[in-house]
Image (cartoon, rainbow, N blue to C red):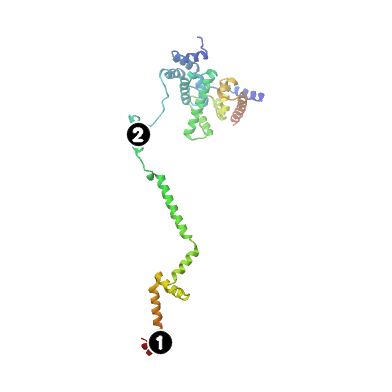
């Protein structure tokens, strides 16, 4: 490795190069004078090159202008319910409630629904007839508020009997009875 | 004229009454070395001039805290090298280009530069150096042009002597191959 390095180094050193990097005339003399300003100026900093310009006094008033814009905003008290995230939470809660209610309604027990439908299909008259045939106490039914319906039923039954007798020539018998 | 040692320069710099004089002496002693170290990294004169200015501003700001754990000249070289590399890095970022593209542009600037008066062979040699990876380029320049010892380069770059020797070896081999190929074409 040492020999290889020496060979390559020798090759480079023996290159017949002329010239190379150059500097402007008196550059180092001027450089020294220029750089001494660093020690002569307290808190010397390199001026930044900036091709963009700003209006005169822009940075003097910038801070005050920004504070004027920002401070009133800071002084405002925003109620909790008006804040964005609270509003969102309320909306989400309301939606969840709505959906859960909808879910409960759609998924109520099917057998219960069927019974209710059956009940709605039965008329009061049919119920009374059923109860009468089963030998239920009529007074009890009357107490339950079904008196009118019972009377109507009885009248209807009487009318049917009368019609039957008329049709079969038993008018006289009927008149005597009355 | 008796040259003041680096230790005395640092001591004088830390004395507020002698600070300006000491800085002027440091400037006289190191401006050329800083310039050439920067120039070989950033290639163009204008960029090297910027790097020299930045380097001496840093020296002015930081020399008061210098604790003499290293030699003054290696400390100054380290600042100059870091400033030059940072300058190149910023230029690369500003132009949004890769390191290879950056090296290519530096090669073009070299051949077009007003302040490069080398012959064709010198231009080829510089282009060969530009093609090296960053660390190899730094080591080669400091060893070949500045004739610095590996121990001094170690103090500047913070790389072990063994690694520096390997870098220099690879650098010379690559340069030889590059130049021979260019001469044959």
SS for callout 2:
helix
Which image quadrant for residue B166? top right
Which image quadrant for residue A123? bottom left
Q: Position of residue B152 (x, y in %)?
A: 57, 20
Question: Is B174 situated left or right of A140 in this image?
Answer: right
- Count neighbours of disc 2 (C-alpha within 10 A) and say few if under 14, some if 14 to 19, many if 20 or more: few
SS for callout 1:
helix
- Chain letter behind tag 2: A
Q: Mark 2 vs mark 1: same chain?
A: yes
Residue at mark 2 to residue at mark 1: CA–CA distance = 108 Å
- Chain letter behind tag 1: A
Question: Can you say whether A149 is above or below B184 in the image?
Answer: below
Q: Position of residue B177 (x, y in %)?
A: 61, 29
- Count neighbours of disc 1 (C-alpha within 10 A) and say few if under 14, some if 14 to 19, many if 20 or more: some
Q: Which residue is mark 1?
A: A165
Q: Which residue is mark 2?
A: A67
> Do we see residue B117 in this rendering?
no
At 46% from the left and 67% from the top, the residue drawn is A117
């Amino acid at each position: 490795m040492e020999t290889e390095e020496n060979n390559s180094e020798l090759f480079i050193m023996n290159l017949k190069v002329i010239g190379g990097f150059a500097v402007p005339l008196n550059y180092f003399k001027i450089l020294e004078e220029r750089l001494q300003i660093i020690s002569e100026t307290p808190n010397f900093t390199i001026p930044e090159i900036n091709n963009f310009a700003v209006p005169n006094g822009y940075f003097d008033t910038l801070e005050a202008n920004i504070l004027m814009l920002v401070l009133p905003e800071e002084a405002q008290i925003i109620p909790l319910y008006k804040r964005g995230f609270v509003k969102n939470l309320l909306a989400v809660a309301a939606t969840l409630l709505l959906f859960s209610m909808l879910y409960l309604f759609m998924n109520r027990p099917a057998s219960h629904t069927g019974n209710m439908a059956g009940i709605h299909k039965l008329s009061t008259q049919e119920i009374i007839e059923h109860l009468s045939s089963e030998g239920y106490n009529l007074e009890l039914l009357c107490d339950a508020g079904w008196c009118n319906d019972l009377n109507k039923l009885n009248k209807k039954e009487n009318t049917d009997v009368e019609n039957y007798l008329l049709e079969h020539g038993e008018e006289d018998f009927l008149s005597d009875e009355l | 004229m008796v040259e003041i040692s680096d230790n005395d320069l640092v001591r004088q710099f830390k004395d507020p009454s002698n600070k300006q004089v000491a800085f002027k002496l440091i400037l006289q002693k190191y401006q050329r070395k800083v310039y050439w170290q920067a120039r070989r990294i950033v290639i163009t004169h204008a960029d090297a001039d910027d790097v020299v200015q930045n380097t001496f501003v840093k020296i002015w700001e930081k020399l008061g805290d210098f604790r003499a754990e290293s030699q003054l000249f290696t400390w100054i070289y380290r600042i100059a090298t870091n400033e030059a590399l940072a300058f190149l890095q910023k230029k690369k970022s500003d132009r949004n280009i890769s390191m290879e593209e950056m090296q290519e542009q530096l090669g073009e600037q070299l051949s077009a530069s007003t302040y490069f008066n080398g012959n064709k062979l010198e231009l080829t040699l510089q282009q060969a150096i530009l093609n090296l990876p960053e660390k190899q380029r730094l080591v080669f320049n400091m060893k070949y042009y500045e004739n610095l010892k590996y121990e001094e380069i170690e103090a500047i770059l913070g790389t072990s002597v063994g690694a520096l020797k390997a870098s220099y070896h690879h650098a010379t081999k690559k340069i030889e191959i590059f130049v021979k190929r260019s001469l044959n074409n």
